[in-house]
Amino acid sequence: MFDKVNEVLPLVTKPIRYTGGEYNTLLKATEPSKVSWVLAMPEVYELGMSNYGLRILYSVINRIDNAACDRVYCPWPDFGALLRKEEMPLYALESKRPVKEFDILGVSLQTELSYTNLLYLLDLAQIPLHRDERDTRHPLVVAGGPCTVNPLPLVDFIDAFVVGDGEEPVREITEVYADWNHRNRDDLLSSIARLSGLFVPGKTERRRNSVRRRILEELKEEDFPFPPVVPICETVHNRLTIEINRGCTRGCRFCQAGMINRPVRFRTVEQIVSLAEQGIRATGWEEISLLSLSTLDYPDLLNLVHRLNSRLKGRNVALSLPSTRGEEFSPELAFDMKEVKKTGLTFAPETVSSHLKSFINKNISEARTVEAIRTALDAGWRGVKLYFMLGLPTETDADVDEIGRFVNEIARMCQGRAVRYKLSPFVPKPHTPLQWAGFVGVEQVREKIDRLKSVLTRRNIKAKWEKPESSFVQALLARGDERLGRVIEDVYHKGGVFQEWTEYFRFPNWVEACEKEGVDPDEFTGRKELDFSLPWDFIDTGVDKAFLRREYERAQQGEETPDCGRTGCTGCGICPEGKPPPRPEKTAVVLTAYGRKSKPVMNYNEPKNRFRLRYVVKEPYRFAAHLDRVRALYHSLRRSELPIIYTRGFSPKPMLSLGPPLPVGLVSESEYVDIFTSFRYSGNVVRDFGPFLPRGLQITAGRRVPLDWPSLCKLINLGRYLIRVPDVGERLPELVEHGHRLAGVRNLAQGPQAGLILDLAIVPGVRLFSTLAQLFGIEEKEVRCLRVARLDCLIERDSKIMAPMEGVNES
């Protein structure tokens, strides 16, 4: 089937999304005795590959002896349309096996706006959308992720929901499936319904607190996703992610993640440092993200960052933090964070108004936020990003104006450096103290956004905001019941996919679907009384509903609740006997260099050796862009631990001299790159570097060349290509005559395997596909579907043609 897929991939945007071949993918042999999983996120590859939860489960399942796991993501609409047109089912990236042939399809539901994409994925996989239409021939469809704390809108489509941490349930589901006799699907569902933390529609009784969230007691090293899969193209989070703790004790009343991930569980400093060293060696990434809901609350963060830098700065590995509260961002931390390079820095004050800070229980001192930003600027950061919410209950115009005043003040302080801020309308989510509050309304939110935009006029302020309409739909789906399933399906059948993407979101489709199905959106998005029976009450997250009710009442009274991690138990009910899990002890750190002006750590060694390598580009990298291959070379060099020379500047990278870009859609028998090493290295570069390249890139030759030779881009000016064309022999005289009139064509000759060999100049203004379109008299779109290979990159000089491995010295 994949041969047919390869025929249409040249016609879609970013075909590299659909090829697989990533470094560290696990290719386990498929056997009838093994339970086959395929994990999916109903989003595009760049977002799906960045999801940390799926990475964990992919690793956990592939470590089970009698299980194997592949991955799949939602195709962009152009590829989805081609799959339908050619009647090809959606396939998994590793094995290229149709998704419908797997035993279990596991779907991660991260946002409500991805619900229509779930149907899109099932449809393309040729799996019945409705669970009651599936039988023993179809995969078991299991959903997990934060959205499952209210599974009702999707009960028509999902066979089983995992509520809570998934590391242990996937093992148990695998065991149940392995014991199933494959005769009666109903028996399988009944067995799964008996597992803790599983909601199986039609099997699980929906009474109060009948489904208890699964909680992983400890973040174990064996559950870390190792070896991490390195994406084949640029993704949203292309770095090593280490979860330093799970859960949060701050108690922000709007934050669903903070409530449903309690209690907080910490990794030790020693475990984090060990995972970081292993992860960097296995991936070659140049950045580590310390993942947490509130990273600055990690008790021994300064010691952790100091330890990581001492181990990794020699490899030019930088550290980054996700969005933070900001008030704990100290000068000492800023000093350590900038050792290699200054990564992004994001603060999330949410609001500036004092009474709203108390309402949401996130009372961050404005002075401390300003101090944290000034610390970042003094340490050399070129700007900051700020997150705010609009549309909170009791919010006034004066509260909105306060945000404008604060952002303008920060913009003045930044003195031309970028201040990016994002506005998100408040969406009341299930299982939070504000679940009884309502969505303020589309028009009201739009007015607030317009009011704020009108006062933020400084040129260094860069604004971004969510559409009020999409936030309204998010609130509708987050708070809905099973009646919303018909609405979701109606929107999908009207073409409503990728609803998180502005270019595809169509609000009228949702309005019309609600009207058609007799659903009143206000019934779900409006404010609720405290005694109202909420649709999701049968899900027990471990946090008492009585605690949530008390917190809502305290919010209305403007009362704050302290952080239980600092002041003691506040009675949420999650910890046995009120005893929280152990926390790492804080360690005193002596920073002898603190206060001294420093520069990022770099390798200032001058190059002593230059090696020229010839390598092959095979099928997995056929559709990779030039920068994708460059990143693959960077990561491979880092993995090899060769004594490579790094570029200077604030983002050091391995020093390379690259040949001309290979057009997307071509394989190649001869591409070239020069790498530079220090005087310490005198080994065999092909032997020492080759094993660390991903599948699809292979070194075929290497030699030491003089340091003063010209760069490959200056030398290489001719490409030799093999184009497979039917009946080329009969047309050769005509093609030769026509080709010699085209710019850049140096030679045409008959090649092997019914092919045409073309020598084409690599100079500005000469493009391969455009030349072939003129040569054959067809459209460029048709040319891209031809099988074309680059045989070599050559040097044409003084009527002579030489290979780059021979080298040329300019005189």
Image (spheres, grey):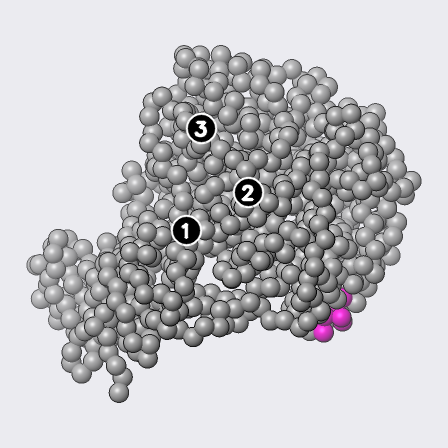
Q: Is residue 482 magenta?
A: no
Image: magenta residue range? 410-415
Nearer the N terminus, badge 1 or badge 2? 2
- At a point 78% along the width and 40% down the height, the residue shown is 565
Please provide percent x and percent y for residue 432: 75, 35
Residue at the spot of label 2: 52
Q: Magenta region, mostly helix, strand or loop?
A: helix
- At a point 32% along the width and 65% down the height, the residue shown is 682
Nearer the N terminus, badge 3 or badge 1? 3
User: Which residue type does callout 2 highlight?
Assistant: Tyr
Nearer the N terminus, badge 2 or badge 3? 2
Which quadrant, please, contains the C terminus? bottom left
Say if 386 sits above or below 241 in the image. below
User: Which residue type does callout 1 highlight?
Assistant: Ile
Q: CA distance from mark 2 to mark 3?
A: 19 Å
Please provide percent x and percent y for residue 222: 52, 35
Residue at the spot of label 3: 64
Which quadrant, please, contains the N terminus? top left
Residue furthest bottom as drawn: 811
Say if 641 sits above or below 202 in the image. below
- At a point 52% along the width and 22% down the height, the residue shown is 172
Crowding at mark 2 (Cα within 10 Å: few <14, some 14-19, many 20+): some
Along the line of sight, which residue is nearer the eye, 778 or 583?
A: 583
Say if 782 sits above or below 713 in the image. above
Residue at the spot of label 1: 232
Q: CA distance from mark 3 to mark 1?
A: 25 Å
